[in-house]
Image (cartoon, rainbow, N blue to C red):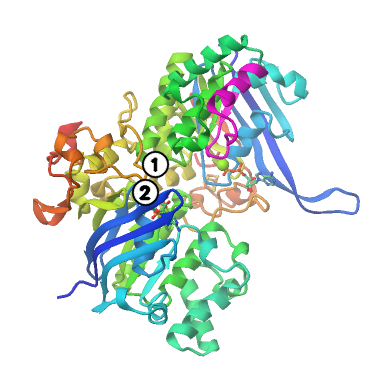
Amino acid sequence: MMPLLSVKDLAVRFETHDGVVRAVDGVSFEMEEGETLGLVGESGSGKSVTNLALLGLIPSPPGVMSGVVHFDGQEITKLSEPDLRKIRGNRIAMIFQDPMTSLNPLLTIGRQLTEVLELHKGMKYAQALRQSAAALGEVGLAEPEKRLAQYPHELSGGMRQRVMIAMGLLCEPRLLLADEPTTALDVTIQAQILELMAEVQKQHGTAIILVTHDLGVVAGSADRVAVMYAGRIVEEGPTQDIFNSPVHPYTKGLLSSVPRLDSDTSCELSSIPGSPPDLAEMPPGCAFAPRCPEVQPECLLTQPDLLSSGSPQSRNACPIASPRASREASS
Amino acid sequence: MSQPLLKVQDLTKHFPVGPRTIFGKPEQFLRAVDGVSFQIEKGGSLGLVGESGCGKSTCARTIVGLHPATSGSVRYEGVELTSLSRREWLPYRRKIQMIFQDPYASLDPRQTVAQILNEPLKLFGLGRPRERRLRVLALLEAVGLNPRHVQRYPHEFSGGQRQRIGIARALAGEPDLIVCDEPVSALDVSIQAQIVNLLSELRERFDLAYLFIAHDLAVVRHLCERIAVMYLGRLVEEAPRDELFKNPAHPYTKALLSAVPYPDPEVERTRERIVLGGDVPSPLTPPSGCPFHPRCHQVGDVSGDRCSREVPALVHEGQRSRACHLD
Ligand SMILES: Nc1ncnc2c1ncn2[C@@H]1O[C@H](COP(=O)(O)OP(=O)(O)OP(=O)(O)O)[C@@H](O)[C@H]1O
Ligand SMILES: Nc1ncnc2c1ncn2[C@@H]1O[C@H](COP(=O)(O)OP(=O)(O)O)[C@@H](O)[C@H]1O
Ligand code: SF4
Ligand code: SF4
Ligand SMILES: [Mg+2]
Ligand SMILES: [Mg+2]
């Protein structure tokens, strides 16, 4: 069977004054229906640009995009802008970190929701309004009819995020791109929103790409994890495997830098020395080499490819490192 | 016991909001900090946690004199700070320093690192120009920056390095207390760990006390001996670190701890989570009685409608304190 989404050799570069920024550089992955893929990595590693590229939303100029994306049996990288617009917010929906950037501050919540239904489902206003109220109720907003008449600034951050999710799910998308959907929220509200997204996914079989820098969120929500570094996926696999036996030195470093509520407070946190490379001045060879504790001379020569390793579901882009046996053994 | 380094008592900070009446009086006050008390010993560290908007930053800014207090007291080695004039503040400005969340916004982009670090030295009259130049290099070394980069501008550094510059600036006057407001929240995990380690090393080396604000409980746990939990302008619980994490006593603390995502799929799959209903109420219209009562999962365990009628006081018992009507 064909996967719901297949991304092949996706690349996005921005031609800026400081040179060519390779924001995404040869990203490939697949997704099945109902699955959650956690996309993690440091800020600037290309997570958001990857998501925007899937929707054909890279501003051009300065952006230039290449690669092939198949969605639901269709090559969407070949579609025209009007055809893409029919997919966005409909079969593929997005939720962003800051709801204020995607909610129009000048329009009521009701107006923004009904517009989506009128556009994609050809509904009449009255029916769209009823459906919108139902959608707000479904995401746990009290008094949905009253909310429809309100403007975004009249709601709290958590409520706005729920409106965003309601809007994202209005047309029952097959794929939901959630870019840091809970980063701006407090942990108690974050727990509500993540629970809500999981419920919706179970009901509708939605596939979710969950972009986040919070490894705790990924551990709780993702079936699979892809780790990005400097525009490339450096490791990918089932969540359990990534956390229990990471292979790539960056993944290992990332996991051990996270302070945990049960970690030993008497010793230092382990950290990765240095900082991520400048995407406009990438070194040849492995991008992680300047920070890598396991670096070898050959790492500086050629860029390693993302290859299957161990199980068929796992891939990593480091020919040198061996897996960390298990957390217990290493600590 | 000797007197604490910092003693905060019944501190309140209310902001006037909305239109004013014809008499020029504001119609409404936002109670950002509403009666907060705690103390920090010399070389001690207190972590202040709570949801966004609960008043952590306002509390910090009021303590360091960036906001005038509405009422209450802030004593530094016994000296009342809230009634000091600008001039009288100067020696304390040297002893109490602040580090901010956003390393980008808190540094002047037109100044070199040398100028940024020289400024507090000059302000506090520390040394002649030559000595100050050496001191600047020593500060850079202390925070792990290359002294050769002393003529660079902030934009030439990464986020983590900029936070190191902010820390060096805070260290310049040889402070006793550093108020850290979310100093690592804007940084990536791998960089965040570097800065947390640096802060903990500097504390040992210079015998610093920290008031440390962060929303990441695991970070706070790593750096602070005591933890205070704030909700809607008030402290709801304060306890030694390990006791708070092992045995939280306030329902809000319990919910907060149970909501922290855990970077371990097995733990996440099996743990019980208290998912609170509702949103954080606005400090403009705080609920009656216990500020947490509209969201509290244990409100039923208190007899009658006491939770919605009566504000629970912060009650001390041994090393810990809690503000809740539960037995
Ligand atoms: N419109 C643009 N013009 C130039 N460069 C861009 C543009 N959009 C993104 N970039 C660059 O692309 C790179 C990747 O950005 P992206 O936002 O995808 O990273 P991210 O991993 O999602 O980061 P964060 O976690 O901070 O959101 C960055 O170096 C960014 O500066
Ligand atoms: N200068 C100000 N004027 C009016 N309200 C303010 C001001 N500064 C902060 N507040 C309000 O005070 C409350 C507490 O804010 P803050 O101390 O910044 O919270 P935190 O740091 O915990 O996020 C918030 O509701 C905020 O909007
Ligand atoms: S390829 Fe070499 S430098 Fe890159 S992660 Fe592997 S060991 Fe480190
Ligand atoms: S006083 Fe009542 S409402 Fe407040 S935290 Fe305690 S039990 Fe909950
Ligand atoms: Mg992003
Ligand atoms: Mg704050």
Q: Which residue is mark 1?
A: B188
Could you tell me how far apart the alpha carbons at marks 1 and 2 are, in whole angstroms?
Answer: 8 Å
Q: Do the numbered discs 1 and 2 sit on residues whose CB atoms are within 8 Å?
A: yes
Query: Which region shows up in magenta?
Result: B97-123
Question: Can residue B50 be seen from the camera position used here?
Answer: yes
Residue B20 in the image: state x and y as whole percent: 83, 53
Q: Is residue B100 above or below residue A319?
A: above
Q: Dividing the image into 4 quarters, which one contains the C terminus of chain A?
A: top left
* Residue B115 horizontal/vertical position (percent): 59, 24
Check the residue under mark 1 and report the chain it is in.
B
Residue A52 quadrant: bottom left
Q: Is residue B11 left or right of residue B256?
A: right
- Mark 2 residue element: loop
Q: Which residue is mark 2?
A: A213
* Residue B263 or residue A118, whichever sits in front: A118
Residue at 37% over, 40% down: B189
Q: Quadrant of ligand 3?
A: top left
Q: Amino acid at mark 1?
A: Asp
Is the CB atom of the residue marked by disc 1 within 8 angstroms of ligand 1's nearest atom?
yes
The foreground one among B210 and B11 is B210
Q: Residue at x 17, y 52 (%)?
A: A305
Q: Amino acid at mark 2?
A: His
**Does the magenta portion include B34?**
no
- Label 2 CA crowd tier, 10 Å (few <14, some 14–19, many 20+): many
Left or right of residue B159: residue B121: right
Label 2 chain ID = A
Q: Is mark 2 within 8 Å of ligand 1?
A: yes
Q: Are marks 1 and 2 on the same chain?
A: no
Q: Residue at x 13, y 39 (%)?
A: A325
When asked about the image quadrant of residue A6, the answer is bottom left
For mark 1, give the secondary structure.
loop
